Structure formats: structure tokens, C-alpha cells
Image (tube, helix red, strand yellow):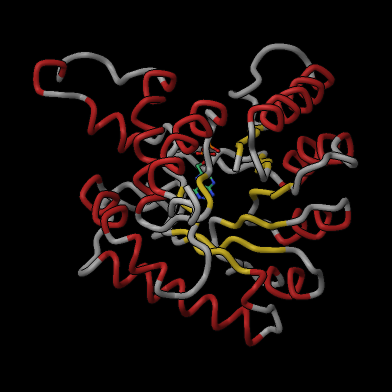
Amino acid sequence: MGIVNLTPDSFSDGGRYADIEHAIAHAHRLLGDGADILDLGAESTRPGAAPVSLEDELGRLMPVLAGLRDFPMPISIDTYKPEVMEEAIRLGAAMINDINALRAPRAIDIVAGSDAGVCLMHMQGTPQTMQQDPRYGDVVAEVKQFLADRVAALEDAGIARERIVVDPGFGFGKTKAHNLALLRGLGELGALGLPVLAGLSRKSVLAKLTQCEDRKSAPQPEYEDRVPASIAAALLAVFKGARIVRVHDVKATCDALAVYSAVMAEPPLAV
Ligand code: HH2
């Protein structure tokens, strides 16, 4: 899953028209790079990020979605707002990727009334507060239980299991230790019997892991410096059973996964 961010900080130069063109060009680049799903998002959910109004989110997202109408790849929309889900589905979005796991009023009904797929992500708190003091007894068990409860709620509303993907929500109300425990325990989430999506790409947990002792006083690595660690994390997530990895660096990740698959796949019978 390749990420296209329509947040102003991602596309700081140029006006609105340039943003739309830039986003559509980026989507085509990710397609060429080997992505299988595109994830379009118009609100940053990084810790402390300011919420975006409904009007702004629709204004950023819909022209790009309309411009990708005949795009030969399923498009997922990263939103927790029911109004955005409704409009995106109307414009042909194949999947709703909700960091809030369809907990907003009406969100379940909107998805239930469509044939879109849905990614349910775990988050403790909200993006504004989630990194203040996240706590769990057993993070893997609690995340798994949350996801199981949300899957049950969706099934009760008539959404078939075949349409659901689950995601532990790396970095969403989790310390470094919580994130590592979830990556180690990703197989536990696989026991829910649904495809697992993992999103670790360029996240700050990777920067924390790569700052070794003698670099402690150095500034946080730029996001680009997180690419090698992101690829390692994507491979580890796949090794632990993830079926979808949400990444910024599609080409590099696909190359790494090609090597991984060549080594890890069952050899053909007649070699
Ligand atoms: N992470 C972000 C946004 N959406 N969706 C899923 N399913 N899983 C994730 O881990 C996930 C997500 C982080 O978002 P943001 O801070 O906006 O940055 P970016 O979209 O560049 O990753």
C-alpha cells in the first residue's frame, strides 16, 4: 500500500492546482513502483497534529480522487470522518482506512451500505494526546481484543469478514516498547483470521531505534534517513504475517520484498 499524503506540509510548494497535479503524478509513480493499493489521506495524524476541518479535508481529497477515476489500482481513503467516507465511496474508493476503527457515529452504517473494504486500526487516545503517557497491561492482548470487538461490531452491522483488514496502529498511543511488542506479537493478531496491515514506514519509533549511543546528541534523522529502517520493519512485519504494508517508499520496499519472497517462498515442486 503506497501512501499519497495531501497534507499541506507534504506538498508545501505551489497552489491548490499544483497540489492536485502533484498528488496525481505521485499516485502514478507509486503504481509504476509496484504498489497494489493506494492510500490517500488529507489529514496528518502524527502525534500532536492539528485536526483538519471537514471542508478542508473534502476540498483536498475529492479533486484528487476525481482525477484518479480510471486509476488501475484500488484506492483506499485514510479518514475517520463519516462524511468523507460517504463522499469517497460515492467517487469510487475501494476501501476506507480508519485510524478510529469506524467508531464515529454513522461510520459503520456508511461502510455497511457500500461494498467497500475497510481497515480497522487500533489507537489509544486521539492524535492530539495519544503519545502523552500510553499505558497497557498486555499491549498485544489488549490490541487484539479491541480489534476482535470492532470486527464483531462490523459483522453485527452486516459487514462481511471478507471486507475487513486489521491493523495494530503502530505509533498510535504506543511507546517504543509497545511498538516492538506489537511487531514481535503480530502473529497473535493474525489469529483473528483476517489480513493484518502494518504501518511502520518512517515512524518515529524507527528513528528512536536507529539513534545509537554515540549519536544521542544528534538531531532526529530526517524522514528520508528512516528509509532503511522502514524497509527492515516492512520485511519483519511480513515475516510476522502482515499481508499489507503501508509504506512511503514503494520501490525500495518492493525490491526488498522481491528478495524476501524469492528466499522465503516454498520452492516450486519441479526444480
Ligand atoms: N499511520 C498513519 C496514517 N494512517 N493507517 C493505518 N491503517 N495504519 C497506520 O499505521 C497509519 C495509518 C500515520 O499517518 P500520518 O501521521 O498522517 O503520516 P503518513 O500518512 O505520512 O504515514
The N terminus lies in quadrant = top right
Which residue: 46% across, 46% down? 199
Which residue: 51% across, 55% down? 243
Residue 149 to residue 9: above or below: below
Q: Quadrant of residue 229?
A: top left
How many numbered discs, if any? 0
- Can residue 206 be seen? yes
- Can residue 47 be seen? no
Which residue: 75% across, 20% down? 22
Left or right, 200 with reference to 43: left
Q: Residue furthest bottom?
A: 156
Relative image position of residue 176 (x, y in whole percent): 24, 45
Residue 91 to residue 160: above or below: above
Which residue: 64% across, 25% down? 8
Relative image position of residue 181 (x, y in whole percent): 24, 56
Q: Quadrant of residue 219?
A: top left
Relative image position of residue 205 (x, y in whole percent): 30, 38
In this rendered view, identify the residue nearer to me: 24 or 1.
Answer: 1
Residue 136 to residue 84: above or below: below
Q: Residue furthest left?
A: 213
